[in-house]
Amino acid sequence: MSPLSPAYFAFAATAITLYWLCYRWKNARLSVLLLANAFFLARLAWFYPVLLLTAATIDYLVGLGLQRVPRDQTSRRRALVSISVLLNVGLLAATKCIPVALGELYRWVFPLSLSFYCFQSMTYTINLFRGIDQKGTRSYLTHLTSASLFTVIVAGPINRISDLIKQLQQPFSLTPTQGGRAFLLIASGLGKKLLIADFLSNNVANRIFDTPTLYSGAEVLIGVYAYALQIYFDFSGYTDIAMGLCLLFGLTVPDNFNRPYWSVNIADFWKRWHITFSKWLRDYVYSSLPNAYRWKGAPYLYPIIVFLLGGLWHGLGWTFALWGLLHGLGLSTLRTYQTFRGKRAPTPWGRYVGIFITFHFVCLTWIFFRSPDVATAVAILGRLASMTFSVSNITLPIVGVMLAGVALHAIPVKWFDRTVEVFGRAPFVLQGAGLAAAILLIEFFAGRGSTSFVYSNF
């Protein structure tokens, strides 16, 4: 069941309605949400509910053990958390290694990547082990519900399980403003995906990345820009839909994006792009490396290691490894530069130069990320170096959608918040009607069928 299909939204609407009907009784509404999670997983493949709820049960038992074992018994606590880490890393490794063996058959047998489930699950037991969360949950129902939340299990955002548990244990509430924000986020996500990301994918990016030698250097450059916009609107579109659906369940989940192509340097980019993933890498990978915050060489070497691993998480291939390596080297180079020059606030012109350089460095890394193999990436770089300027394959609709994408990316967050305030004052029935009308318009203008979300493959 694709998160873009009418069946998905009909299922989500049914689950939300039943959840609201049970709002007075915590265990009843949690049971509704858990059943919805299990149903969604079962629609993907029959074994997913069994596999993930079994894994969540083991993490729950590990959590109980960590709450009972005193902090001074380090060896016992380390043994407990190791069970959880090995379990989740094993599931994560399986989702990356099995595709190598099965090839295209993998998506037919395993339509859901388990990455985002594993990332979230490890936050719970590791935080209990470290003492960041002093108290876990003793409610089996609450833990299973938070660990298998269907709205975020496909492609995030990556939540801290403890944050979801706290929210699920609170009385349910949904203000008109929150309802308005939820509806606007869902409409925004659908528009980003269907009107911009899919259009750019079908009409520009896929064609140029599939056969780059058929296009001029200028057309290839436009194709790279188009992919930068495509992946942003694709991924942020999914995030908006997930955030909106979570809000309708009374849950607030973190945003993943904050105008990433306005970043002044590569470190700033990773504070704005896939924010929950970069924080996860920092908190659970970087901080776990030896003497991460004491060794003076750590800020220069460890980003390379961390982002190389982050690249390989996307897929076991040279293109993803090079993508991660380039980002790691970029962060290390920036840190070296700042060490010698000092961290100074950029001048207005310096800020624009930084944005220009950072955006084009990120576009360079997207070439490796999107290319099916290194040979294709080299061919694209070769076409860029050819300095040929024909743009006969770039139509006015393509230019129009790309300019619209640039304009939407530049919209300040406060503008959206003001729209939410106005929309939130409307009666709930009008909000729902507005969302339905927006969906119908988006479907009408979107044209042919949609493609799957890019990050649902990771």
Image: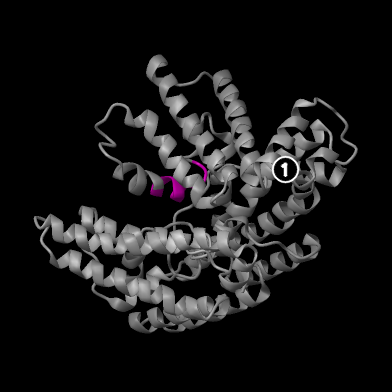
Question: Which residue has dot 1 on it?
Answer: 226
Magenta run includes residue 365: no
Picture coordinates of residue 386, whole percent (x, y) = 80, 26
Image: 325 above or below 167:
above
- Give x and y (percent) for residue 423: 59, 60
Q: Residue at x 80, y 50 (%)?
A: 203
Residue located 50% across and 41% down the image: 272
Give the residue at the far top of this rendering: 341
What's drawn in magenta, residue-wise? 272-280
Looking at the rendered structure, the kind of residue marked 1 is Ala
For residue 20, side relative to residue 194 (left or right): left
In this rendering, the answer to whether 19 lies above or below 307 is below
Magenta stretch: residue 278 in it?
yes
Residue 323, image x and y in percent? 56, 40
Q: Nearer the viewer, residue 123 or 369?
A: 369
Q: Which quarter of the rendering shows the N terminus?
A: bottom right
Asked where in the image residue 322 lies, by quadrant, the reply is: top right
Residue farthest right in this picture: 392
